[in-house]
Image (tube, grey):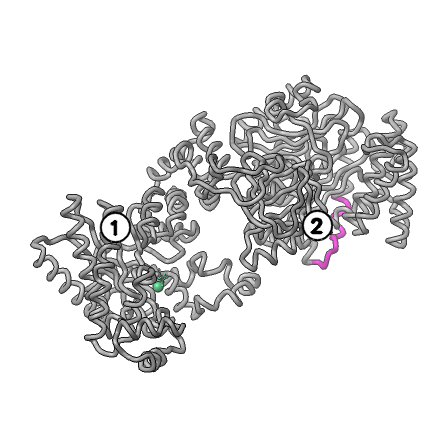
Amino acid sequence: MQYVYRFGGGVSDGGAGDRNLLGGKGANLAEMASIGLPVPPGFTISTEMCTRYYEDGSAFPESLKAEVAAGIAHIEGITDKVFGDAANPLLVSVRSGARASMPGMMDTVLNLGLNDQTVEGLAEGSGDARFAWDSYRRFIQMYSDVVLELDHGAFEEALEIAKEDHGYSLDTELSADDLKALVTTYKGLVEQQWGKPFPQDVHEQLWGAVGAVFGSWQSERAKVYRRLNDIPADWGTAVNVQAMVFGNMGDTSATGVAFTRDPSKGDRAYYGEFLINAQGEDVVAGIRTPQYLTKAAREEAGAKAASMEEAMPDVYGQLAKVFDLLETHYRDMQDIEFTVQEGKLWMLQTRSGKRTAKAALKIAVDMANEGLIDQKEAILRVDPLALDQLLHPTLDPDAPRDVIAKGLPASPGAASGIVVFDAETAEQRAERGDSVILVRVETSPEDIHGMHAARGILTARGGMTSHAAVVARGMGRPCVSGAGTLAIEGKAKRMRVAGREFKEGDVITIDGSTGEVMAGEVATVQPELAGDFGTLMEWADAGRRLKVRANAETPLDCKTARDFGAEGVGLCRTEHMFFEAGRITAVRQMILAEKEAGRRAALDKLLPEQRADFAAIFEIMAGLPVTIRLLDPPLHEFLPHEETEFAEVAQASGISVEALKQRASELHEFNPMLGHRGCRLGVTYPEIYEMQARAIFEAAVEVAEKTGEAPIPEVMIPLVATARELELMKAVVDAAANAVFEEKGRALDYLVGTMIELPRAALKAGDIAEVGEFFSFGTNDLTQTTLGVSRDDAARFLGVYVEKGIYAKDPFVSLDTDGVGELIEIAAERGRKTRPGIKLGICGEHGGDPASIAFCEQTGLDYVSASPYRVPIARLAAAQAAL
Ligand code: PEP
Ligand code: MG
C-alpha cells in the first residue's frame, strides 16, 4: 500500500482529483506543481494513513519509514539541502490537510529540522543569524505547543518579557543575541514542563509532528467543527511535509493570504493581506494586524502602511498573474497562501475560498456571465441554506446609531445582543434565550462553540483573513474584527471604548457589512431581493420541476412568502388563527361546550373571523392554490389555565366556572399527540369542520367577486388513517360547499384531499385516493408515528442518536429517507395507481430542507411547502435536485 505522494521539482504523484486521498491541501499542491507554479517541493502522507493510524492504536506501520525517507530524499534532491545536516540543513513544514477545508482547526509545525547544530548552519548559509535564531525560537515554541502540548502561555510570556527587558514593542526588534537567549529560556521551559530536553534528533522531530497532526483530527475543536459542518469523522486528514520557504528573511521577504475575489462582497478584485518579514502563521493568527494587498483596498480603508502592490510591485505583478491562472484553472474563487523569500514568490496553498452567501451569489452569477462556468454550474455553486443569511434584516440606514468603534467588515449582516467576553458564557446565555455578541481580543479556534452560539462576533485584533473572520463567514455569523480602539478586559468582563465602559450584559449592535460597532440596539430593515439574488433565482426557477409553496396562515406570512416566490400556500394551519386575541374565548367556549348547540353558538362567533382570514389569504395568493387544513391539534392546547380565563369562558357560555373546570378535566389526555386531534375532531364534532368549510367557501366566492380572480381552495383533512374517515369528512366539506354555492349563486372549483401523516394512511393510500383528490405528506407527524419518537420529547435523546450514528441527522430536520421515505414512496405509488396524476406534496418541516427536497424530486412529488423564509432555499434546492 502506498501512503506517500510527492510533488514539486517536476514531479507530481497526485493532482486536484485526489482530494479524498491527499486532502485538499495536498491535492492542490500537487496540482499547482504540475501546472508549473512555484511550489516548494514536498510530499503528502495520505488520509488512508490517518485512518490506519487510528485503527492501529496511534501507531505507524513499519513500511511508512522507507516511504517517508524517500519523500525526504525527494525534497533534498531538489533543494540541494540535507535534513539534519549541520552545515546545509533542510527545514520542512508539517501541515494538516483534510478533504474538506477546516481552517485553523488542526495543527501545523513550521521550521522543523532545527536543532542546536543546524541553527548554526542555517545562520551561516543564509548569512542572517537573526533569521536563523528567530526560526529556531519559533520552532521550539510551536513544537512545544502542538507536539509536546506544553503550556503555550509560558512561551508567550517569555517572549513578552524579552521584549520588555529591551524596551522593544515589536518581535522584529529582537536581535540575534536576544533570540539566542530566548531559545535558551525556551529550552529551559521545555525541560521544566516536559521533564526531558527539547528533541535534537530531526527524525524524532518529524515523526512527533506527523503524529501530532494526525492526532489533531480528534481534537475537541476539530470534532466541533466537523459536527457543525457535517464532515464525517472517518475521512481523516492527510499530512503535508514540505520544504520551508521563509517570509522572515528581511524586508524583501513577506508572507500573505489572498482571495482572487472579495470573499465578503464577491467583487471581482484581488483581496488579501500580507506582512513583510514574517511567517505565515503571523497573518492568519491575527497577532499582527496585516497590510493590504492592493493599493485600492488600502486607500478605501484609509490605511497608511504600504500595500504589497506599492511595496513590492514586481512580486505583486507575478502574484496577480498566478491569481488569474488559478481562477481559470479551477474555475472558482481561490483562497491562496504565499510566501516571498528574498524577492522570489512561492505558492503554499490554494483552495476554493470560503465566502459569504452574498459573495457566493455574486461570484456564481459573475462567473456564469464571464463564461467561466455555465448557469447550471452557477446554480450548483450556491449552498441553499446559506441564502438564509441574505433573507434576514440588515440595519436600517436611517435609524440613529451611536457608533462607538469601527473595525473590519469581516462577515456581513447585523446583530444586536448582550456583550459577553468568553465562549462558555456565550453558550450559557444563548441557551437561556439571550441574543449574544461574543467580544474577544482575538478569537482562537477553541472559541468555536461560543461563536456558534453567538449572534455576532467582535474582536479587537485580527484582519479579514484571521481565523475569526473565516470561521464567522463560514457560519454566517456577522463579525467585526480588528476594532483596535476597544480595550477589552476579558477577566474583568468589561471593555472600554471611546471613554465609555460596557459590562457583560450591556447591549451593543455590530454591523458586519460596514465594521461599525454601536451602543444599544439599532432598528433593522428587510433585505433587497433583486440583483444577483434575483438572477440566480430566475435561473433556478427555469431549472426546477418541483413547485414551491409556503406554510403560512397570516396575511404577513403569506405576503412574505409570495415576495420570496412561493407558488401558493401548501399548508394553512387554521388552529394558529384561533390563538388570536379576542377569539380564544370563543374557541374555548366551543371546546368546552358539552352539547352541539353550545358548540354551534361559539362557532357562529368564529365564522366571520375565519372568513375574513381566508379572504385576506386568497387575495394575497390571487391566482395560486391555497391549501387550508381543517382543525388539527389536540383540544387541550386551547384549554384555559388561569382563573380569569375560566371566568371569561364561563360568562360567554353561561355556565359555572366549576362546571367548566370539570369539563376541562374530562378533556385531559395522557398522550395528546396520539389523542383526540386531527380528523378525529371532525368525526366527533362535524360542526367544527362544517363551520371552517363554510368560511373557506364564503371567502372564496367573496374574493372571486371582488377581484374577478377565483381562488383555488384545496381543503385538507389532517391525521387520516382510513378511507372512511376521509369519506365522512369530505361529505361535510362538500355539503358546506354546495350550500354556499347555492346561497351565493356561484360555484367554484375546489379540491378535497388529505394529509398522509400516519403509516396506515401511507399503506392504504390506494383506498384513500378513491376519496382524496390530493395528498400532502405531513412528515412531522409521519416521522413521529413511523419512528415512534415523540416530536415534543425527541430533543432530549436524539442528539445522542445522531452522535452514535443511529440516524445520520435529526430525522425531524432532514427526512429519514430510508424509513419514512419508503412509506412516502409506497403511498405515492399506491395513490397514483388509484388516481393517476393525483397531486402530491410535502408540508412537514422537511419541505425546506435541501436533502429532503432532493428526495421529493426523486420521488416525483409535485411540490414542497416550506416556511416563508425557506421558500428561496427550497427553490434553489429544488433546482439543484433537478440538475
Ligand atoms: C406535519 O405533521 O408534518 C404537519 C405539517 O402538520 P403539523 O406540523 O401541523 O402537525
Ligand atoms: Mg401533522
Image point (53%, 67%), residue name: 797
- Front residue (pair 775, 828): 775
Q: Which residue type does callout 2 highlight?
A: Phe
Note whether residue 80 is visible.
yes
Image point (24%, 64%), residue name: 766
Location of the C terminus by quadrant is top left
State the residue position of label 2: 214
- Front residue (pair 20, 657): 657
Residue 451 falls inside the magenta stretch: no
- Residue 485, horizontal then vertical, whole percent: 68, 36
Where is residue 839, by image quadrant? Answer: bottom left
Image point (18%, 61%), residue name: 694
Q: Is residue 877 left or right of residue 229?
A: left
Q: Is residue 1 left or right of residue 572?
A: right
- First to last magenta residue range: 56-67
Query: What element does badge 2 sit on?
Result: helix
